[in-house]
Amino acid sequence: MTAPLASLPLRFHVIGRGAMAARMRVLTGDVAIEDAEAVYIASRNRDHAAQTRAALEAGKAVLCEKPCVTDPAELGDLIALSQRHRLLYMEAVATPFLPAVAAALHAADTGRLGRLAHVEASFGYPVARARAPRLFDADGGVLADRAVYPLMLALIALGPVRAMDCTVERDRRGVDVAARLRLDHRAGGTSDLAVSFLARLDNSLRIEGDAGAVEVLPPLLTAQRLRFTGPAARAPAWWRRTRQNPLVRRLGDFGARAAGRWHPLGASPWLHELAHFTTLYRGGQIESPIVGHARMAEAARLIGKARGA
């Protein structure tokens, strides 16, 4: 990734100074806001809502890093603003657009797994405050930084949530550093989701139905392989830990290529999301059919509720 991609002709203005903003400048380029068609917001979490509002009021489409807001009450106004001005607005959650994850979600949506019953997903690995201090600020925490990844996948697969039980672990300064969410979905089915700054979790996605299951193998955020199993079959706990070893993963990747379970993500895990956003913009859409406004609002509501637990 050494130059903006010619295959993404949308003119972006990028806001932010961190690592994600730098990645986006490489992938999309960065033009002055008056020349931009869209704004990519990758600034501090606490600034996302105000910068989204300013961009929409300036007539620009918005792709905003998660969390799209820190206060769920703000999101309704931003969605209404984007709809009123007919401007595309989407939270940047790249995982559903990875080919392997998209293939798993498609299998669930088209009935290959039968009647869906359960989603299990996690995202966690140790991170030290000294190495990433912004994650531990008042507008940070594991729920703001990581929860949307498994949560959005559960919402896509099983739909809106009727009830949630959560357990949140906080450090001595009161910042949430680990959480487990148990969701009961309105249409039936449950989800068990986990995020952590303290431990390496399974970092995978599993969707179960009464006719079978599909598992996206770790690491979830750069997933490239999956496997289909019977509804009751699942890897033992020792193997779920072992398969994240780099050598074991390389061997698994080789086998997945040979078995047709390989879904390469390409040069960057963010390209598929950017291509999706660009297609929506060129088609005159104002929200994504995948990371849509209702799902953004539902995710923000649940994360807000968990943060307050």
Image (cartoon, rainbow, N blue to C red):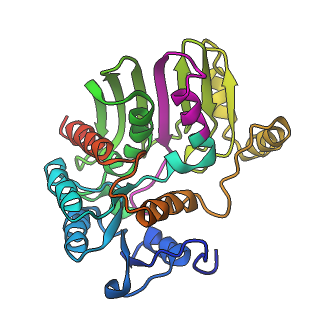
The one of 23 and 52 positioned closer to us in this rendering: 52
Q: Quadrant of the N terminus?
A: bottom right
The quarter of the image holding the C terminus is top left
Total numbered labels placed on residues in the image: 0
Q: Which residue: 36% across, 55% down?
A: 91
Which residue of the protein is positioned furthest toward the right in this rendering? 258
Q: Position of residue 145 (x, y in %)?
A: 37, 52
Residue sitting at x 61%, y 22%: 112
Q: Is residue 172 left or right of residue 215?
A: left
Of residues 225 and 166, the one drawn nearer to the viewer in this rendering: 225
Q: Quadrant of residue 239?
A: top right
Residue 108, horizontal then vertical, whole percent: 54, 28
Q: Position of residue 122 (x, y in %)?
A: 48, 36
- Is residue 122 located in the magenta-colored stretch of the structure? yes
The verdict on residue 159 being magenta is no
Instruction: Please tell me whether residue 165 is drawn above or below residue 2 in the rendered image.
Output: above
Name above or below for residue 259 compared with residue 264: above
Quick check: 247 above or below 210? below
Residue 177 placement, left or right of 20: left
Task: Identify the magenta region.
Answer: 103-131
Q: Is residue 137 above or below residue 239?
A: below
Q: Position of residue 200 (x, y in %)?
A: 53, 40
User: Residue at the spot x=42%, y=26% of the render?
Assistant: 192
- The residue sitting at the front extreme is 283
